Amino acid sequence: MKRNNLSSLIIFSIISFIVLSSCQKKEDTLPVPDLGKKLAPGQSIGIKSVVNLRDVGGYTTVSGEVVRRGLAYRSNELNPVSPESMKKIAELGLKYDFDLRTNEEVKEKPDELPEGVKYEQLNVLADAKSAAPAELEKLMHDPKKANEVLGGGKIDDLFIEGYREFVSLPSALEGYRKLFLALGNIEELPSLFHCTTGKDRTGWATAALLTLLGVDKETVMKDFLKSNEYILPLYQKDIDEFVAAGGEKEIPLAIFGVKAEYLEASFDEVTKNYGTLENYFADGLGIDEEGQQALRKLYLEKK
């Protein structure tokens, strides 16, 4: 358990700290897609304050059906949100916002939402132990020390353990159960779910849903990796400064980005613990075959 606790501590608390220090000053400098164009599946909808806000739908399944757009959205944190961006978010007509972050993350940067959107926190990492965030701040300000603790591939090992926790932690099972039940309730849609950068906790939720709906593994992975296109540019300066001070480049790339082996670890944990994704939903999340079929009926349509 000590290894798992350390992985949660380093991965998510560091992300929270660095997001606090850099996101606001860069929100208006990232190129975003033209909202007037038809967006490809997995493409950012172009809201500058929330660059990783994407429609989960649009993908074609192996059976030839299409995942409906306009029902579920994934994103990074909703703070800060400029007035212009808030108007665009309001146009989505959201009914619910599901926040997958920890209590500390929520306290530091509470969600900013359009009027009328209901909020619910689903702390999927509530059962993961962590130490003082101040220690992490010191670590990220000391690249040489960071090399000792996280270098030589250790950062990837920690993220892989963290992604396994998405499947194994009791709090994660409880949080994702509530999320998928809500996403399967037409009365609560359209809804948005998010974490800090919208790539890890949110990445697993999206991958699990798309896979259940019948989207092939390669497409699910491409959608997962798209977070790199929207999140990494926000932190290029931080990455450059960290490397210039002697830090290993792979450390900030892992912290701010995603890699295929991370998501593969979650799926491997599903196979190890449940055998199939359907069993994960049934036995792990308590969403039986009837509930799974309800999700497919709601989200899938013929071309």
Image (cartoon, rainbow, N blue to C red):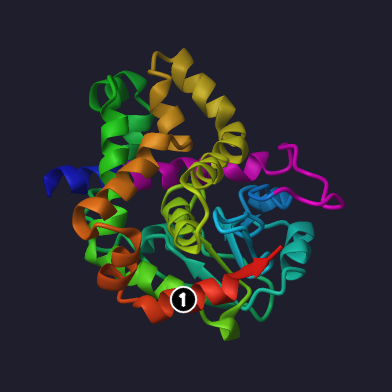
> For the magenta stretch, what is the residue range?
11-40
Which x, y percent locates residue 285?
31, 71
Q: Is residue 174 above or below residue 128?
A: below
- Residue 81: quadrant of the picture: bottom right
Please state if 248 lies on the left or on the right of 183 as rendered: left
Q: Is residue 180 above or below residue 73?
A: below
Please state if 178 lies on the left or on the right of 21 as rendered: left
User: In the image, is residue 30 part of the stretch drawn in magenta?
Assistant: yes
Which x, y percent locates residue 189?
61, 77
Q: Nearer the viewer, residue 39 or 11?
A: 39
Residue at x 28%, y 23% (from the top left corner): 145
Q: Secondary structure at mark 1?
A: helix
Which x, y percent locates residue 153?
29, 24
> In the rendered image, is residue 301 in sight?
yes
Q: Quadrant of the C terminus?
A: bottom right
Point out the residue furthest to the right here: 36
Which x, y percent locates residue 152?
27, 19
Residue at x 26%, y 52% (from the top left corner): 271
Residue at x 20%, y 57% (from the top left corner): 273
Please state if 156 lies on the left or on the right of 58 as rendered: left
Kind of residue sitting beneath label 1: Gln
Residue beneath disc 1: 293
Please state if 8 lies on the left or on the right of 218 as rendered: left
> In the rendered image, is residue 135 in sight?
no
Residue neighbourhood size for the residue with mark 1, other residues' Cα within 10 Å, grouped as few (<14), some (14–19), many (≥20)? some
User: In the image, is residue 122 part of the stretch drawn in magenta?
Assistant: no
